[in-house]
Amino acid sequence: MVDPTNISSNRSLRPLPALIFASRWLQLPLYLGLIAAQGVYVMHFLIELWHLIEAAFGNQQALEALVTAIGYKSNIPVTTLNETVIMLVVLALIDVVMISNLLIMVIIGGYETFVSRLDLEGHRDQPEWLSHVNASVLKVKLALSIIGISSIHLLKTFINADNYTDKVLIAQTVIHAVFLLSAMAIAYTDKLMSAGAEKGH
């Protein structure tokens, strides 16, 4: 007896549905572009790290490059690597890492969800979250990652608060709160949809 599920899964699509379904491959250049952006972030990370190491050994040009990069200003000229500069640089490096993690989630999770299977089942390096990823899970994870990045930016602003106006500080705090509320709303909506789907079954 022929299994009807095998027939439905193996039958070829009609030309128009096949064309529409194949259009998902148009996203491939977008994900390849994000991989290139990931490479740029890696270069930026290594350059900033090298400047930090050079500044630690007394290189004034590297120190000036760091101070300019983090937007640090002081009434007293910065001639040595102080704790505030180190903290701001490290936070900037963490920021790059978190954005890089966000890129990885979008590249791998988005490709797996919207383009094609990666066939990583059984691979020792398969990300744990990829085994149960779907559009809803990816959306929640991205929201949480954005909150983490926003938190780093807010912390950098507070550490360097003397160089910002009260208006900017309040605006960044409000924006972070909006991100947080948005993520909570997305997670709650996803929970309601998951509960509804379970009841439907």
Image (spheres, helix red, strand yellow):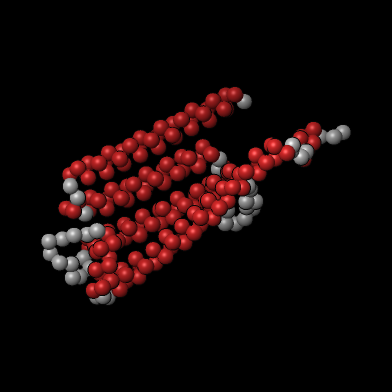
Residue 143 percent coordinates (x, y): 42, 41
Image position of 157 (left or right of 97) = left
Residue 27 vertical position relative to residue 87 in the rendered view, above or below = above
Q: Position of residue 65 (x, y in %)?
A: 27, 67
Instruction: Residue at the far top: name it.
Output: 200
Q: Is residue 177 above or below residue 118?
A: above
Residue at image point 21% right, 54% down: 160
Assign the N terminus to one quadrant of the image.
top right
What x and y, as percent, mark residue 187?
A: 44, 35
User: Quick one: quadrant of the C terminus?
Assistant: top right
Residue found 27% across the figure and 53% down from its top? 156
Of residues 132 and 108, which is closer to you in this image?
108
Q: Residue lying furthest right in this view?
A: 1
Q: Is residue 121 visible?
A: no
Q: Which residue sits at x=60%, y=57%?
A: 124
Q: Is residue 194 visible?
A: yes
Observer-nearest of 155 and 166: 166
Q: Which of these two is toward me, 196 or 14?
A: 14
Which residue is at the far left? 75
Report how many numbered discs are placed on residues in the image. 0
Q: Quadrant of residue 78?
A: bottom left
Rendering coords of residue 49 (x, y %): 35, 67
Residue at 58% x, 43% y: name it.
114
